[in-house]
Image (cartoon, helix red, strand yellow):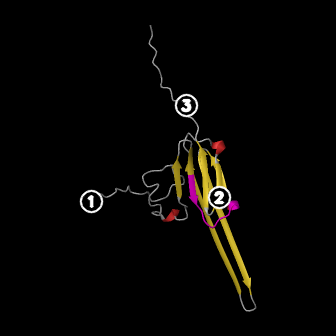
């Protein structure tokens, strides 16, 4: 008898936002939905003091990205348009390409949003998300009436 990994039934339509660590399928096959084929793959690594996120985005330049934080989400957008035109005596060749994506990650509560750092090198967009100390949640205390 062999063990087979159970896969949940996937939704018909993609969701706009993905949880930071996601569900069971987050690090598995992300190509199941034809609507998210342009969504770049990411790696998330947690250390004691920070989260390290790497997003594969080859062929883009640093200026092609727009990165923002909105209501606890790290939003990464990229757009690149390339047009080439070559004119010779007998012909004109015109080429056009367009590439874009949007990726939104829900940030954990312990991320210092004001200290997020990003860098782009060799087709990989890297983020360092510093952690902050979360205050311990105090549970309600019952007071007896004397």
Q: Gap between marks 3 and 1, in whole Å?
A: 45 Å
Q: Which element carries disc 1, helix, strand or loop? A: loop
Above or below: residue 118 compared with residue 94? above
Q: Earlier in the sequence, mark 3 or mark 1?
A: 1
Q: Earlier in the sequence, mark 2 or mark 3?
A: 2
In the image as oriented, which residue stretches furthest toward the front? Answer: 48
Name which residue lies at 71% across and 77% down: 84
Q: Which residue is mark 3?
A: 135
Is residue 24 magenta-colored? no
* Location of residue 81 in the rendering, given as x and y in whole percent from the top left corner: 68, 69
CB under 8 Å between callouts 1 and 2?
Answer: no
Question: Residue at 52% across / 52% down in the picture?
Answer: 44
Q: Which residue is mark 1?
A: 2
Alpha carbons under labels 1 and 2: distance apart: 43 Å
Q: Report, in whole angstroms, how far the alpha carbon at label 2 lies from the one at label 3.
A: 33 Å
Which label sits on residue 13?
A: none
Identify the residue at the far bottom of this view: 90
The residue lying at 68 percent from left, 72 percent from top is: 82
Quadrant showing the N terminus = bottom left
When the figure is inspected, residue 99 is found, relative to residue 133, above or below; the finding is below
Count of marks placed on residues: 3
Asked if the residues shown at circle 3 and circle 1 are in contact, with their CB atoms under 8 angstroms apart, the answer is no
Label 2: which residue?
Answer: 120
Label 2 close to label 3 by CB (< 8 Å): no
Q: Provide the residue span drawn in magenta.
A: 53-63
Eye-nearest disc, 2 or 3? 2
| Number of other residues with Cα within 10 Å of mark 3, as a class: few under 14, some 14 to 19, many 20 or more | few
Query: Which quarter of the figure is the C terminus placed in?
Result: top left
Which one is in front, 22 or 129? 129
Residue 24 location (% of width, % of height): 42, 52
Q: Of residues 127 and 39, which is closer to you in this image?
A: 127
């Amino acid at each position: 008898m062999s063990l087979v990994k159970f896969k949940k039934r996937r939704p018909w339509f993609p969701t706009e936002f993905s949880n930071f660590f996601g569900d069971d399928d987050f690090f598995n096959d992300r190509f199941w939905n034809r609507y998210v084929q342009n969504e770049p793959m990411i790696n998330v690594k947690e250390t004691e003091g920070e989260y390290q996120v790497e997003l594969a985005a080859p062929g883009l330049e640093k200026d092609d990205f727009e990165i923002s934080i909105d209501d606890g989400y790290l939003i990464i957008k990229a757009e690149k348009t390339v047009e080439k035109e070559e004119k010779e005596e007998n012909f004109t060749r015109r080429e056009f390409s367009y590439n874009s994506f949007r990726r939104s990650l829900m940030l954990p509560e312990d991320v210092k949003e004001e200290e997020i750092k990003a860098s782009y090198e060799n087709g990989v967009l890297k983020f360092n998300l510093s952690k902050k100390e979360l205050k311990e949640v105090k549970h309600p205390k019952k007071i007896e009436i004397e």
